[in-house]
Image (tube, rainbow, N blue to C red):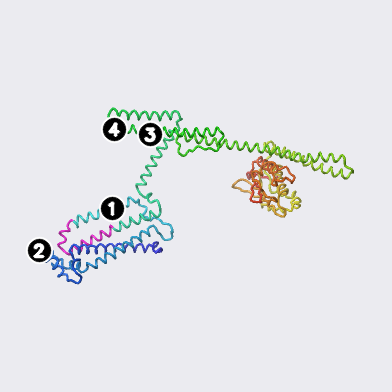
Amino acid sequence: MKKLKYSFVAKVTAVFLYAFSVMGAFISGSFIVAAYMLQFYKIPIGTHYEMAVYSLFSNNYYYQSQYDDLLSPQYYSIGRAVFNFRYWAIAVCAITSIIAIIIFIFLLCAAGRRQGSHEPVLGYMDHIPLDVTLAAIIAIIFIVFWILHESILYELPYMLEYADDIGITIAILSLATMFSMLLILHFCCTMAARIKVGKWWRGTLIYMIGKLLWRCISCIGKFFLRLFRSISLVPRAALVVAVFLFFHLILSIWAFAGYNSFATFLLAALYFIIFIISILAAAQMKQLKKAGEQLSAGNFEYKADTNHMFWDFKNHARDLNSIANGMGVAVEERMRSERLKTELITNVSHDIKTPLTSIVNYVGLLRTAPDRETQEQYLDVLSRQAQRLKKLTIDLVEASKASTGNLPVDLVPTNTTEILNQALAEYSDKFSNAGLEPVFTPPEDPVIVLADGRHLWRVLDNLFGNTVKYALPGTRVYIDLFSSVTAGEAVISVKNVSRDKLNVSAQELMERFVRGDPSRHTEGSGLGLSIARSLTELMGGKFDISIDGDLFKAKILLKVPQPQIITNK
């Protein structure tokens, strides 16, 4: 059954069967009506035609003419056929009606189905507006039956005098009925197809005209609304009041001078509208007042509900919400800045105090050293702590200059592949001692970027130094380098697995004095990533890090110069 719904041959065959079923039902129905009107169903089965006519009409003088007609030569054959097939006509009418109903339901189910498409589709006739199709079908059926009425039904009393004319009349009426039922079937099928596709009302001429009119009215309304909104608040309010007063004056004159009840009703409606608008305006003013009070009290989480506001009340509420959002962000940034300042002071004090305390202590120990060998050991510790203090001081100064943009930057076309190879060669022993295996496959063509070679070296130095300190021993460090011509930038990425759990977010890890190990047992200032980001931004690039579990990934994006100025450095 499902396959038949998609078969064109099955649909055409069903239409022909439907037509013949309708014709058979009409003809058999005509036999039933004739037999009922002639009272043939009162006669028992097995009775001869002549005996039936005699028993029905011969004893009644009023029906004597019908008795003579049914036994006359011109009506004898058709009357006998109606009598003999009166019960067969009921069976034929029932069977053909059931067949017609089944085929009608099948065609409705098959409407919009096409071979090769699982979704319902519209045919050529389905694109005609639905209301136009309905009007055309009604007009055609009306014209057909009007013609039949003027040519056949009007002359029916005279045509019944001849049996041959009765047969022709029934045949013509059955054809007209079949044609009308086919038109109705077409309308039902196209309606079913449109419903299956969805939003069937869009295929009506009324909807199309209404949509066009709505667009025109909407465009005109939007034009006047924009024109109205372009006027400042005070002239706009004056214009609204002037329009109100004008209508009020007209309606007052019409109502009181002419004693017009309709004008009085319009005037009362105008008062009611002004009353409702006043209440709504007062309620929205109350909401704005509450929003202002909450904002002045420091509650930046409160938001005025703008869903049911209108005109400038809604715009003012949006402005208050925007102010609350902006002030909330400013307060959050201020608190974050204060927190970072506190952490900066704490971390700087801790990092400076540690080597400084060691220097003071070992100076005292050096003075009381018993032998030369012990003095040399103390001097080594002093030298190491002094270098640590020096590096911390240099990092602080450099971080300050980098964040404020006070470092000189000389952007020139730079061979990134060469600098990466040099940095990897410099760190090969450190990677080996840390149990790390760097994996770097240089691209076939050199990747040239606009950068300052010194600053780019420092960025890579900080990244590789961070990797040596915090990467898990026995793992690989992946360094990738590629350029995107469409994006106009080159990308350097460094990926490694962290030795310790990364309990901080990527944003916090970019801040100063923040390390991956909260215990702070490793040496370092915690400024490496912050300096790398500041130096990358000074060169017009971007520095970003991401954390996925224990996987740490740093990405450097630098601009690629124009081809005509590419040179190797």
* Amino acid type of the residue tagged 3 in the rendering: Ile
Proximity of marks 1 and 3: CB atoms separated by less than 8 Å: no
Task: Work out whether residue 352 or residue 28 is closer to the camera in this orientation and state it.
Answer: 352
Q: Is 49 displayed left or right of 304 in the figure?
A: left
Q: What's the mark number on residue 61? A: 2
- Circle 1 — which element? helix
Q: Judge whether residue 401 is colored magenta.
A: no
Identify the residue under disc 4: 261
* Amino acid type of the residue tagged 2 in the rendering: Tyr
Instruction: Measure the alpha-carbon separation of dots 3 and 2.
Output: 81 Å
Q: Residue at x 86, y 40 (%)?
A: 366
Tell me where residue 358 appears, x and y as whole percent. 80, 41
Instruction: Measure the alpha-carbon separation of dots 4 and 1.
Output: 44 Å
Proximity of marks 4 and 2: CB atoms separated by less than 8 Å: no
Indicate whether 97 appears above or below 559.
Answer: below
Instruction: Measure the alpha-carbon separation of dots 3 and 4.
Output: 18 Å
* Amino acid type of the residue tagged 4 in the rendering: Ser
Task: Work out whether residue 147 or residue 26 is closer to the camera in this orientation and state it.
Answer: 26
The mark nearer the N terminus, 4 or 2, is: 2
Q: Is 507 displayed left or right of 239 in the figure?
A: right
Identify the residue under disc 1: 138
The mark nearer the N terminus, 4 or 1, is: 1
- Circle 4 — which element? helix
The mark nearer the N terminus, 2 or 1, is: 2
Residue stretch rendered in magenta on the structure: 154-180
Residue neighbourhood size for the residue with mark 3, other residues' Cα within 10 Å, grouped as few (<14), some (14–19), many (≥20): few
